[in-house]
Image (cartoon, grey):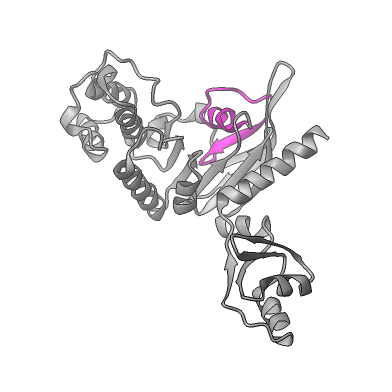
Amino acid sequence: MIEAESLTKVYGATTAVAELTFRVAPGVVTGFLGPNGSGKSTTMRLILGLDRPASGRVLLGGKPYRELIEPLRVVGALLDAADVHGGRSAREHVAMLAASNRISARRVREVLDAVGLGGVADRRVREFSLGMRQRLGIAAALLGDPAVLILDEPMNGLDTGGIRWLRGLLRSMADEGRTVLLSSHVMSEMELVADHLLVIGAGRLLADEPVADFVARHSAPVVRVRSRELPALLGIIRAESEIRDGVGLVHGLPPREIARVAMTHGILLDELAPVHASVEDVFTRLVGQHEIRETA
C-alpha cells in the first residue's frame, strides 16, 4: 500500500503539494488525475524519494522509499521514458538496473520479452521510437517483480495494440493483488482500466473514490428524450432542458418523472434514456469549479 499523510512540498513561494492525505490500495488500479501543474509529478517524485517533502510523509509498505534495501523489488516506476542513456542498448540499460538490486540476468531477458523488446534488446536506445522507449521503461519498472507499480503517462507513444497490451498488464497486476498507480491524460483509457480515482488540483485533493462514485457524485442526471411533441413536453417539465439536433436533453430529473409527466399530458415518447457522463466530463467540470474558487 502507498500511504501519504499531510504531504506538502514547497518550491520557493510556490506550494506544489498541500496537505495531501490518501491511500493507494492493493488489488485495484488507481488512476491519478489532475491538470498540468496540479502537482501529480511532484507527488510521484515524493513517493519515490526523488524529492523531500516540506512536511508530512509517504510510505510504501510501511516504509519511506529511502529506507528500502532493494527498492526495485518493492516498487517499480516509470516517470520519464526519455530519461535513458541513448548510447546503451536496451539490454545494457535493464542489466545495469538489475545489478544494482541483485536481480538475475534471466529476469532481464524475461522482462524485455514480456514488453515485446526481446528481438531488439541489443539495439541502442537512441534508435528507439517513443513507443519502444515506453516499453523499455515499463520493462525496467517490472524488473524486480514489484508489489507496487507507479507509471506516469505510460500510454504516450504507444499504438493501439500497445495500449491494449498495457491495459491488460495493469489489470493482471491488480488482479494479482499488487498496488497500481497510473497517471494519464488519456481519459478514455483511464475510464477503461481504473477502478479508483485520485484527483488533485493546485496541489490539493479534490476526489478520492471509486470511478463509478466519482461520476455519479459529481454529475447531475441527464436524460435524452425524443418525441413529436418535444417542445410541448419541455415546456411542461419543471427542469433545465434544451434541444440539440431535434433531441431533448433534460437535466436534473430522472426518467421515471419525465415519463410520468408525459403520460399525464398524453404525450407519446419515442425515446427516453439516461445519458451517462464520462470521467472526462466530470473531471473537466470538477477541475474548472476548483480553479474558479481558487481565483475568486
* In the displayed structure image, the side of residue 204 where residue 150 appears, left or right: left
Evaluate whether residue 1 shows in this view.
no
- Where, by quadrant of the figure, is residue 40 drawn? top right
Identity of the residue furthest to the right in this view: 296
Residue in view at x 54 percent, y 40 percent: 62
Identity of the residue furthest to the left in this view: 119
Identity of the residue furthest to the top in this view: 87
Give the position of the C terminus as an image quadrant. top right
Between 61 and 284, which is closer to the camera in this rendering? 284
Evaluate whether residue 24 shows in this view.
yes
Q: Position of residue 60 (x, y in %)?
A: 52, 38
**Vertical placement of residue 234 versus 183, above or below:** below
**Vertical placement of residue 264 versus 50, above or below:** below
Between 215 and 281, which is closer to the camera in this rendering? 281
Residue in view at x 46 percent, y 30 percent: 68
**Vertical placement of residue 255 versus 155, above or below:** below
Q: Position of residue 19 (x, y in %)?
A: 71, 35
- Where, by quadrant of the figure, is residue 20 drawn? top right
The answer to whether residue 61 is magenta is yes
Q: Position of residue 223 (x, y in %)?
A: 63, 67
Region of the chain picked out in magenta, as a range:
39-62
* In the displayed structure image, the side of residue 144 where residue 68 appears, left or right: right
The answer to whether residue 7 is magenta is no
Q: Position of residue 207 (x, y in %)?
A: 65, 48
Tag count = 0
* In the displayed structure image, the side of residue 210 where residue 202 appears, left or right: right
